[in-house]
Image (spheres, rainbow, N blue to C red):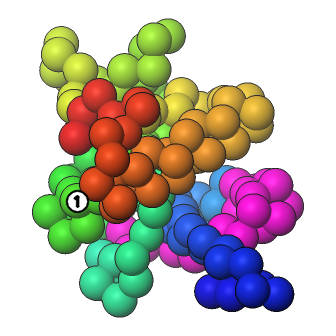
Amino acid sequence: MMNDGISVLTSRLLIVDDQPQILRSVERIVRAELGKERTLVDTTMSPLRALELIELNEYSVVLSDYIMPELLGDELLERVKQRRPTATRIIMSGTNVDDAGKFYPGTQDVPSVLPHYALCKPFEIDEMLRIIKQGISDYLMRATGAAPLADQNS
């Protein structure tokens, strides 16, 4: 994309949450904060629809809830990893994230390496935005072949 002769990079974010209030709130906050930085935001309440969108679009970041009726968030992110390996994967959960930001699916004692980042609900807006911005930066580094700064769990 060109803007007065200067190349402007656009990132794309997909937010997936089956709770409409949370989906709208996160979307509104992200659009208000990151829209200024040329970030396109897509949303869906359906993980199955998210899989369709992933086939159609290249996403910098996929932010998914964990507990959803059609598909658990970690299962969705596993499919994202297979189809769009450079996308940064972030999971949101009210019960499966520890204080260090590690995600523990189901009843496992070992943290999952599937998401790059995990947010514990309820989370601070600033923390969510910081992680999304870092996820975009990580994606750009992976997409250009540079070593990501915070990609501990490719």
Query: What residue is drawn where x is 31% and y is 40%?
Result: 147
Q: Is residue 142 left or right of residue 98?
A: left
Q: Which residues are magenta?
A: 24-50
Indicate the position of residue 97 as horizontal and vertical percent values. 42, 23
Callout count: 1
Report which residue position mark 1 lands on. Answer: 85
Look at the magenta stretch and give its main secondary structure.
helix
Query: What residue is drawn where x is 45% and y is 56%?
Result: 140
Q: Is residue 44 magenta?
A: yes
Is 14 drawn above or below residue 90 in the view shown?
A: below
Q: Give amino acid for label 1.
A: Pro
Indicate the position of residue 3 as horizontal and vertical percent values. 77, 85
- Is disc 1 placed on a helix, strand or loop? loop
Question: Quadrant of the image for the N terminus?
Answer: bottom right
Q: Is residue 111 left or right of residue 37?
A: left
Question: Quadrant of the image for the C terminus?
Answer: top left
Dot 1, crowdedness within 10 Å: few (<14), some or many (≥20)? some
* Pick the front one: 149 or 52: 149
Q: Is residue 91 left or right of residue 71?
A: right
Indicate the position of residue 21 as horizontal and vertical percent values. 71, 59
- Residue 53, picture quadrant: bottom left
Is 119 drawn above or below residue 110 in the view shown?
A: below
Query: What residue is drawn where x is 55% and y is 40%?
Result: 134
* Pick the front one: 153 or 145: 145
